[in-house]
Image (tube, rainbow, N blue to C red):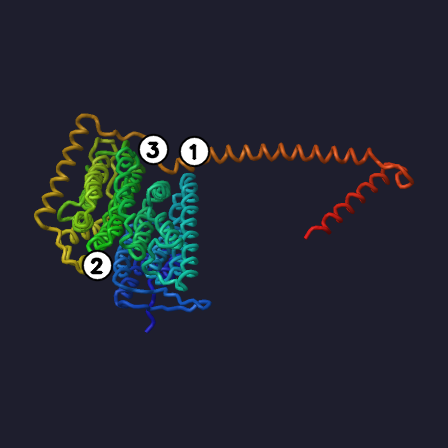
Amino acid sequence: MIEWPPFLIFFLGAALVAVTRGPVRTVIALAVPIFSGVLMWQAGEGNHWPVSLMGLELELYRSDALSRIFGLVFHIAAALAVLFALHVKDTLQQVAGLAYSGAALGAVFAGDLLSLFLFWEAMALSSVALVWAGRSERAYRAGFRYLVVQVVSGLFLLAGALLHYQSTGSLQFDYLGLNSLAGALLLLAFGIKCAFPMLHSWLIDAYPESTPTGTVFLSAFTTKVALYALVRGYPGTEILVYVGAAMTCFPIFYAVIENDLRRVLAYSLINQVGFMVVGVGIGTELALNGAVSHAFNDIIFKGLLFMSMGAVLQMTGRIDGSRLGGLYKTMPKTTVLCIIGAASISAFPLFSGFVSKSMVMSAALMEGYHGVWLMLLFASAGVFHHAGIKIPYFAFFAHDSGLRAQDPPGNMLMAMTIAAALCLAIGIYPATLYALLPFDTGYWPYDATHVLAQTQLLFFSALAFVWLNLKKLYPPELPSVNLDADWLYRGLGRRALTGTLAQLWRWDAALRAKAMAGFAWLRHYLATHVPSGALAGNRLSGSMVIWVAVILAGYLVLSFLP
C-alpha cells in the first residue's frame, strides 16, 4: 500500500481548486485537509516515502511523535482557515492557501535537509501570494520585502545543508547543534523564519497587509515550521533561552502603542513564539513538551483572534483601534468568540494557553533560570494587556464608533466557533493533548500553586489596565507609524547605502575624467613629438612609428615575465 504524503494531497487539491468553480471547488477545498489528515494519522510512524536522487537518499515523508503532532495541528489549522475563507471567490487565495498548507506539512515531515529546503522555499513562494492578494500598493511592496527575507532564509538553509553534508556525509535532519559553521547557518535560517529579535520585521510588515482570510493562513504555519525545526535540531541550546526571553518581552511595548489591531496580533505572535523558543533552549522533556504543546495551542487561539479581527475588518472595513468600538451591540457572536481567544492567549485557567505556557515556566524554575522566569512572568502580564484586554476592548467596547456592522457569514462564524470549542476543550481536559506529546512527564497544570499564581497575575494585570485607563495614562489608540528594526534597513540603511553609492559614483566620475585627460595628453604628445628621418615625413607616419615602438616595447617586457 502506498502511503500518500500530506503535501502531495494538498498540492493536488490546490491544482483541482485552480481549475474548478462553484460547489465542486468548495467540496474539494473542504475535503483536502480532512482526507489528508485521516491518511496521515492512519499511516503511523516510520519512513513512508524514501527517494533516491543522484546518489542521495531523501526522506520526503518521515513520521514520528514530533512531526505527527505538528502534522495534526497543521491539518486542523488548514481546515479552519479553508472553512473561514469559504465565501471568498478569489482563486489566488484559495490555491495559495492550500499550496502553503501543503508546503508547511512537507517541511515538518521532511527527514532530510534537502527536502526541508525544497519545502522551505515552496512555503515562501506560496505564502507571498497571500500577501499580494491584498492587491494594494502597500501589499505589493510588503510582499516583495517579505519574499526577499524568506529567500535569504532559504539560502542560509541551503548553505548550511551543503556544509553539513560535506562535513558529515549525511543530510539527515536530526540534532544539529552549534558546534560547526553549518549548525550556525542553519540556526540563522530557522531564526529568520522564527522571527528572532532584529530579524522579525518581515512578520510585522507583511502579515497585516494580507486579506482578512489570508492572514489566518499566514499566522499558522511559517513561524511554527521554524519552531519545529528548532525542536528537531537544537534542543538544549542554551542561547535560545535568552533569545526566546527577549522575544517574549520586546513585542509587548510595540503592541501596547500599536493602533492597527492585526499588527498588535502580529507582535503578540512573536511574543508567544518566544515562550516556545525558551522551552527549546532549556531542552528538558518538560520544557520541550511545553514548547510543542504551546505551539499547538497558539495555532488555534491565535488563529481564532486573527479570524475575529478579520471578521471585523471584512464587516466594517476598519481595523484601527481608534476607529472601532461599540461593536458588541451588533456583532455579539464575534465578540464572545474573540473573548474566548483572548482568555486562551492570556492563559486563564480552563483555557488552552494555561495548560501549555505553565509547562515552560515550570521548567525554567526547575532548571534554575530564575531571571528568565521573571521575564516570562512579565511577558505573561504584558500579553494579557495587549491581546487579552486591548484587542476585545478597543474593537468591541471602548467607545461607540457609530458602526452597526453585523456578524460575519456563517462559514466564518463556524470556523471561529470550532476554534473556540477547541480552546475550551483543551483547557478543561488537557490529558488528550498531553497524550500526543513527544514525552510522558506526568505533568498536571491544575495544582493550587499554578492556578492561584496565574489568577493573581491576571487579576493585578487587569487592575493595572483599569487604573491606567481611568487616569488617562494608558497609551491612547492614535493613527501613527511606529519605528521598528526594519527602520535600520528601510530608513537609515537605505539612506546610508544611497549616500555611499552616490559618493562612489562621484569618485568613479573623477577617476574617469582624470584618466581621459591623461590619455588625451599622451595622444597629443605622441602625435606632436614625432621622430625625424625618412619614416617620419608626415604626422601620420610619425605617429605610426611611435605606436609600433610602444607595442614592441610592451611585447619585450611581457616576454621577460615568468
Q: Confirm or deny contact between disc 2 and disc 3 (CB under 8 A).
A: no
Amino acid at the residue labelled 2? Leu
Q: For mark 1, what is the residue?
A: 492
Instruction: Give the residue displayed 12% in from the left and 38% down from the top.
Output: 459
Instruction: Give the residue displayed 35% in from the left and 43% down from the top.
Output: 200
Query: Which of the 4 image quarters holds residue 234?
Result: bottom left
Front disc: 2 or 3: 2
In the picture, measured across the screen, residue 284 lies left or right of residue 500, that is left
- x and y percentages locating residue 305 in the rendered image: 25, 44
- Determine the residue located farthest toward the top in the rendered image: 471
- Determine the residue located farthest toward the right in the rendered image: 534
Q: Which mark is residue 437?
A: 2
> Disc 1 or 2, which lies upstream in sequence?
2
Which is nearer the eye, 182 or 422?
A: 182
> Disc 2 or 3, which lies upstream in sequence?
2
Amino acid at the residue labelled 3? Asn
Q: Confirm or deny contact between disc 1 and disc 2 (CB under 8 A).
A: no
- x and y percentages locating residue 308 in the rendered image: 25, 44
Q: For mark 3, what is the residue?
A: 482
Q: Secondary structure at mark 1?
A: helix
Q: CA distance from mark 1 to mark 3?
A: 15 Å
- x and y percentages locating residue 129 in the rendered image: 40, 49
Work out whether 314 lies above or below 20: above
In the picture, measured across the screen, residue 6 lies left or right of residue 406, that is right
Query: Which of the 4 image quarters holds residue 122?
Result: bottom left
- x and y percentages locating residue 3 in the rendered image: 32, 69
Mark 2 burial class by Cα count in 10 Å: few <14, some 14-19, many 20+: many
Q: Secondary structure at mark 3?
A: loop
